[in-house]
Image (tube, rainbow, N blue to C red):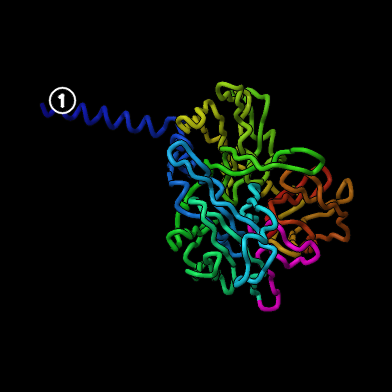
């Protein structure tokens, strides 16, 4: 009997290990996409959270100002209520603002964790206008300048104002349209170290820490603009798709054999746009969803590990299940091997803002062609090019002014037939 018990335990343990090592698995958002699911590709760990326990979320990174509305919580089979909807007020006096003064509905930018619906309409003539408020570079304070209306899932309205961001602390307030039941709230970035967003439930007046500590992909719902009508006109359509974490870059490889495709052929195509995977890996033919069998994605983590990801099935809203296969494809080194004429090289600060400095040591300066420095963005586009002159044996220092948007970049120093390459980030 003891021997039989031991064999059963051994068999169960073997099944569990094999299940953990299985490269293909299901991500279950449940019928009607009732949940958001965060996925850690390195372990296969999934964190499942209801879509409807918050209305707005605040960027909590060191330089984050983005504020988002919960577009995922749209009507589902299990909970037939609309998603929260955000509207801009034409009257920026909180005391007197009324829904008769609604200007337009606002949507999140699904391509960036820095641009939520509250950031959508800044003054184009003011570089310090963040949409919901204005940044004072002398005091490092953001002061709220706009009033919003938010329609909750029960279709009641609250007027809403983000009053300030001071020393990492957001303050805001919301009230009934007649000004009654005013609620004040604060969100301290320091309580959310390493996270992208802090979540706030207007309904419960509660700040929530929902984001797991480690994740790479988020299976969720969001609105995406589609061309409609005349030039420049769009409508926003709700889709189910995949966004990725900050610090992640993704390259898409279409029309390939998943068995033989190599991520190294796509090194110049990695980008940090959040919806690079997005929703178009699946198609609806009128009766069911189909998934392309010649499409894969390469996902590079902040630690430079690359995972190959292929979707193989999608059930749609009836079950809300995505099936994908994930394999570790390799590691991308952020620093290339040093050319033979270099004995050392260092690039800093990284992340950078206004300039990047390259310090390097030469053992000789006999180049077949004049050295050249190039900078590429994360889509492989050349954004800066300059000749490098007056190099000498020994220590050299090169300061490169940057006038670049935030994102990931590649610096390339060409020395004859050799080159030095390093990635860096612009904040």
Q: What residue is drawn where x is 64% and y is 50%?
A: 107
Q: Residue, x 54% and y 61% (percent of image)? A: 158
Q: Check the picture and name the quadrant holding the C terminus.
A: bottom right
Image point 45% across, 39% down: which residue?
A: 44
Q: Quadrant of the N terminus?
A: top left
Out of 136 and 264, give the one closest to the viewer. 136
Tell me residue 232's x, y (percent).
Answer: 79, 44
Taking 181 as reference, is 232 above or below it? above
Does residue 133 show up magenta in the picture?
yes
Residue 26 in view: yes
Most common secondary structure along the magenta stretch = loop
- From where the camera sits, is residue 213 visible? no
Relative image position of residue 136 (x, y in whole percent): 70, 74
Above-or-below relation of 23 to 342: above
Between 104 and 62, the one lying in front of the other is 104
What kind of element bears circle 1?
helix
Above or below, 371 relative to 332: below
The residue sitting at the left extreme is 1
Q: Which residue is mark 1?
A: 4
In this view, the residue in front, 60 or 306, is 60
The magenta segment is 118-139
How crowded pointer 1 is (Cα within 10 Å; few <14, some 14-19, many 20+) is rated as: few
């Amino acid at each position: 009997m003891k021997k039989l018990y031991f064999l059963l335990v051994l068999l169960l343990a073997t099944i569990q290990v094999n299940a953990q090592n299985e490269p293909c698995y299901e991500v279950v958002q449940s019928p009607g996409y009732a949940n958001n699911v965060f996925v850690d590709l390195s372990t296969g760990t999934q964190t499942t959270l209801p879509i409807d326990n918050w209305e707005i979320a605040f960027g909590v990174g060191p330089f984050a100002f983005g504020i988002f509305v919960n577009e995922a919580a749209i009507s589902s089979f299990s909970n037939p209520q609309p998603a929260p909807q955000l509207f801009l007020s034409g009257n920026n006096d909180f005391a007197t603002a009324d829904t008769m003064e609604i200007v337009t509905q606002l949507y999140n930018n699904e391509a960036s964790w820095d641009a939520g619906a509250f950031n959508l309409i800044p003054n184009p003539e003011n570089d310090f206008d963040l949409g919901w408020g204005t940044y004072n570079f002398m005091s490092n304070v953001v002061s709220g300048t706009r009033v919003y209306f938010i329609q909750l899932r029960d279709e009641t309205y609250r007027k809403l104002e983000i009053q300030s961001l001071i020393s990492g602390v957001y303050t805001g307030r919301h009230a009934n349209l007649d000004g009654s039941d005013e609620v004040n709230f604060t969100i301290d970035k320091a309580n959310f170290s390493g996270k992208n967003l802090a979540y706030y439930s207007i309904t419960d007046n509660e700040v929530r820490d929902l984001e797991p500590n480690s994740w790479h992909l988020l299976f969720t719902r969001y609105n995406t603009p589609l061309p409609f009508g005349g030039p420049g006109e769009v409508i926003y359509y709700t889709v189910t798709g995949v966004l990725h974490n900050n610090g992640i870059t993704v390259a898409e490889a279409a029309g390939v054999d998943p068995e033989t495709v190599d991520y190294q052929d796509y090194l110049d195509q990695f980008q940090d746009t959040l919806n690079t995977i997005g929703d178009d890996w699946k198609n609806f033919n009128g009766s069911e969803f189909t998934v392309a069998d010649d499409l894969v994605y390469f996902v590079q983590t902040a630690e430079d590990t690359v995972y190959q990801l292929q979707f193989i099935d999608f059930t749609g809203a009836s079950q809300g299940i995505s099936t994908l296969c994930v394999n570790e494809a390799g590691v991308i080194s952020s620093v290339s091997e040093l050319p033979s004429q270099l004995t050392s090289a260092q690039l800093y600060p990284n992340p950078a803002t206004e300039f990047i400095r390259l310090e390097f040591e030469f053992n000789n300066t006999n180049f077949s062609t004049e050295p050249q420095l190039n900078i590429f963005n994360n889509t492989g586009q050349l954004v800066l090019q300059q000749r490098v002159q007056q190099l000498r044996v020994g220590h050299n220092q090169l300061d490169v002014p940057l006038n670049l948007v935030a994102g990931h970049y590649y610096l390339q120093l060409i020395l004859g037939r050799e080159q030095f390459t390093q990635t860096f980030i612009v904040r």
